[in-house]
Structures are given as structure tokens and as C-alpha cells.
Amino acid sequence: MVSSTFNTLAKISIMGHPAVGKTTMLKLLTRNDTIDPLYIPTQGFDLESIRLNNYNLKVWDFGGQKAYLKYLEDYLEGSDLVFIVTDSTPRNVLNSKKLIELAKKIVDEECPIIGIANKQDLCMNDVSRMDPKLIEDLLHVKTYGLTAINPTEKKSLIQIIEKELNQTLIRRGLK
Ligand SMILES: Nc1nc2c(ncn2[C@@H]2O[C@H](COP(=O)(O)OP(=O)(O)O)[C@@H](O)[C@H]2O)c(=O)[nH]1
Ligand SMILES: [Mg+2]
């Protein structure tokens, strides 16, 4: 979907199993205040439009429930960037491998599939939570650490998005 116009339209899809922090990531991008930690499972999907420097983003947050997997193809098609969010526990990371395989079959070659090792704040108390580098080695996709409930991480998430989208534009010969 990305084009070379000044206000480049880009589609970002956030995938991951339930309760890993997908909606919180979307809130991190769209709000400036503290994030309410209440967990409300997303039914179906959420869609937000976000202005980010040169980009007009459409960010899709896909409710991770199995019942919605049949819509995955329609949901992911035309993505310019896909995030696979994990809660950094070994079990969830291993389960996320299947989502990556599914996503690879649907999106085009230039679309980056990026791992998010979320809930890094919990790593301090729970030694079984894994660091982003280890998760990257297991998932075989570039992976960034994140604490989506921490509003100060907004800037670094925006930087990740801009960097990956800029590289997609270059790969598509549009920049
Ligand atoms: N400790 C911690 N909790 C988080 C983090 N991100 C999300 N959560 C919490 O995890 C729960 C599920 O988050 P949500 O974004 O709704 O998950 P989703 O089902 O993937 O959309 C909520 O209670 C969030 O507040 C994080 O980075 N650290
Ligand atoms: Mg959700």
C-alpha cells in the first residue's frame, strides 16, 4: 500500500495471541497519558488512523482469538509492516512461530515482519521471561523489546515504525 506521495499511506498490522499487549501498543501510539492497565479482550479488530511525520498510518489491532483466524488473510493483505507481539514468555514465543509462518504466506516479500518482545518490565521479577535477543534467535525475525504500558516508550516505538517503513519504501524503489 505504501506509495511515494508526501503523506504516505501505510498499513500496519499488529498480530499476536490474546493478552500479549497488542491493544496497549496501539494505545501507546495514539495517547499521551498513562495507559489504563484494565484488560478488555478486543472483539474482532480495532482500527486507528495515526499521523506520523510523513506517514498516514492505518494501524490494525487484530483480536488474537482463534475464532478470528479465518479472517487473517483479509486482515493482513496489503500490509506494509506486520508486528508479531509476544509477552516474552517461552511458551508464548514458541506459539507465535505459527503466526509468523501464516503471515509470511500472506504478505508480500518487501513487508517486514517484526517481533515485539513486550512486557519487558516483568523480566526483572520473572527470570523465565526472555530478552529480545533470545526471542529474535528463536523467531528468526528482527525483534525489539518493549514495555507497552510505559508511556515513555512511545518515542522508541515510533522510531521503530519509521525506520521499518522507510526501509520498505527503499526496498520497493519508492525512496
Ligand atoms: N506489565 C505489563 N503489562 C502489560 C504490558 N503491555 C500490556 N500489559 C497488560 O496486559 C494485559 C493485556 O493487554 P492488551 O493490550 O489488552 O492485550 P491484547 O489482548 O494483546 O490486546 C492488560 O492488562 C495490559 O495492561 C507491559 O508492557 N507490561
Ligand atoms: Mg486487544
Image (cartoon, rainbow, N blue to C red):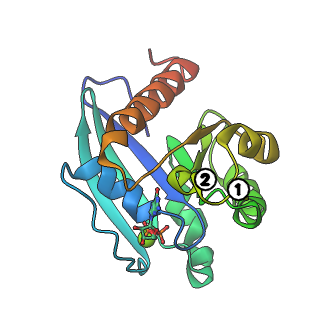
Q: Quadrant of the N terminus?
A: top left
State the SS at label 2.
helix
> Within the image, what quadrant is residue 4 found in?
top left
Q: Residue at x 65, y 56 (%)?
A: 88
Q: Residue at x 37, y 41 (%)?
A: 153
Q: Residue furthest front?
A: 125
Q: Is residue 158 above or below residue 46?
A: above
Instruction: Name which residue type carries label 2.
Output: Cys
> Within the image, what quadrant is residue 175 found in?
top left
State the SS at label 1.
loop
Let me know if residue 118 appears in the view: no
Residue bearing the label numbered 2: 123
Residue 166 placement, left or right of 107: left
Relative image position of residue 160 (x, y in whole percent): 46, 32
Relative image position of residue 12 (x, y in whole percent): 44, 47
Q: CA distance from mark 1 to mark 2?
A: 6 Å
Let me know if residue 166 appears in the view: yes
Q: Is residue 44 above or below residue 85?
A: below
Q: Is residue 150 above or below residue 17?
A: above
Relative image position of residue 122 (x, y in whole percent): 55, 57
Q: Residue at x 60, y 53 (%)?
A: 123
Question: Residue 101 got which mark?
Answer: none
Residue 55 placement, left or right of 163: left
Relative image position of residue 162 (x, y in whole percent): 40, 28
Q: Residue at x 48, y 53 (%)?
A: 13
Whether residues under marks 1 and 2 lie with C-beta atoms below 8 angstroms apart, the answer is yes
Residue bearing the label numbered 1: 127
Instruction: Name which residue type carries label 1.
Output: Val
